[in-house]
Amino acid sequence: MDGQPLTDRSFTPSSNGRSQPPQTISSKDPKIAAQAATDMRNIVRRKLTGYVGFANLPNQWHRKSVRKGFNFNVMVVGESGLGKSTLVNTLFNTSLYPPKERKPPSLDISKTVSIQSISADIEENGVRLRLTVVDTPGFGDFINNDESWDPIVKNIEQRFDAYLEAENKVNRMNIVDNRIHAVVYFIQPTGHSLKPLDVEVMKKLHTKVNLIPVIAKADTLTDEEINAFKQRILADINYHQIQIFEGPRYELDDEETIAENNEIMSRVPFAVVGANTEVATPDGRKVRGRRYPWGVIEVDNEEHCDFVKLRQMLIRTHMEELKENTNNFLYENYRSEKLTAMGVQQDSSVFKEVNPAVKQEEERSLHEQKLQKMEIEMKMVFQQKVAEKESKLRQSEEELYARHREMKEQLDRQRQELEEKKARIEQGRPLEEKGKRKGFSLR
Ligand code: GDP
């Protein structure tokens, strides 16, 4: 497709309905121009002439998701009495939690935090959601709260382990995802800053879960106190390098979505108020809220608290992101660490990320080494051939000399015989000595 000329592509109609010609690339830098050309080739959009049908994909996805239903597992962490159960009931508009019996703070330091999980199928406009809320009663309630995060961390890890085990089974069709997708961490409305226990627990949790800090019972603080408290909490979170959940930003998000996400994130940590009962406002409306002698705090009124923003993030805009982040990063990190600790090794040459520049450099140096080797081999072969030729030449030279010597000796001998014969003739002596004739022997 990239090889096609640009003129073959249909133009995207402009807002006035007329087709727009392809953009021209004008840059003096040839590299920039080449990059721009590649980018343009990649992002040119085609308009189809007829209906193919894939525009219906989101609807298919929607139907499938609705049929399957959704699941969401949220954990609430915070001291008793901070309004965790009330907030969960308020969030999902359900009485998930039965009313609790209050216990005085325990002096028994041997007590531990327990983990309780409650699930409910809730339905809204035909969409089913299996909601599981994991509560951590006892957290922060004892005189000595050292290690009180331990059962919480263990529970989160056990859920990862169970998922890992399910993934490794032969049949992976129906894996139930019991991993914690978000932890709503309740901060006591002291108006000061984070407590050492809060910092400690958040540090233990932030690499394993999406952490969403909330200021509990925000109706007990004034607006100014809440704003100052939020700043101090954020400063503490930054100082201790605690990673709290941030909604991802996508390139294709429209301005409205970006503004909505920014607005949500600007309210973190959410100052929340929970209430499951309806009260009457002075102007006669029935609202979920808390009544005070000086007025009514409305839970669903964005000017009164951040409850709506927290619900928006958890349920309306970021539930899928929370699940995706859990699966793609938090669980993935845990899984790799676990498998590495178990001695499972990965051949890094198979999965390593390839940097094109480094790869090119590697290939170039390999090529050069190959050329060098070839050159050395050719030199060696050449030298060998020269040596062979030289030795052959030497040999034939010697042979020639030998022949020359032999012929010279023969000639010398012949000349000597002839001279002898000449002398005999001159002296009148017979050429052949008597008795020495061939075939006769004198006795
Ligand atoms: P949990 O122990 O953290 O689950 O706390 P609960 O939800 O049981 O609430 C403890 C008490 O705090 C109950 O009496 C609630 O009515 C009250 N409560 C819950 N949420 C709020 C709130 O936002 N503001 C105020 N002022 N009281 C709340």
Image (cartoon, rainbow, N blue to C red):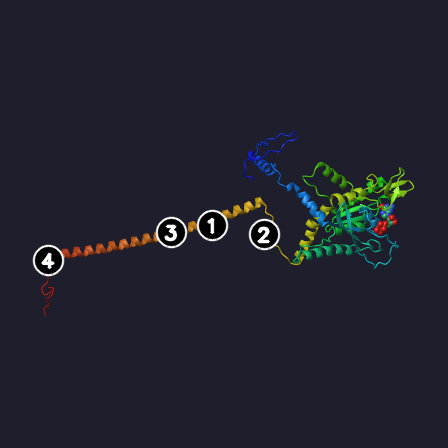
Secondary structure beneath dot 3 equals helix
Q: Amino acid at mark 2?
A: Val
Secondary structure beneath dot 4 equals helix
Return the disc, 2 or 3, that comes first in the chain's sequence. Answer: 2
Return the disc, 1 or 2, that comes first in the chain's sequence. Answer: 2
Instruction: Give residue 373's mark.
Output: 1
Return the disc, 3 or 1, that comes first in the chain's sequence. Answer: 1
Query: Disc 3 vs disc 4: which is toward the camera?
Result: 3
Residue placed most toward the observer, 133 or 415: 133
Residue at 41% x, 51% y is 381
Residues marked 1 and 4 touching at CB (< 8 Å): no
Residue at the disc numbered 3? 385
Residue at the disc numbered 4? 424
| Residues at marks 1 and 2, CA–CA distance in whole angstroms | 28 Å
| Residues at marks 4 and 2, CA–CA distance in whole angstroms | 103 Å
Task: Name the image quarter holding the N terminus.
Answer: top right
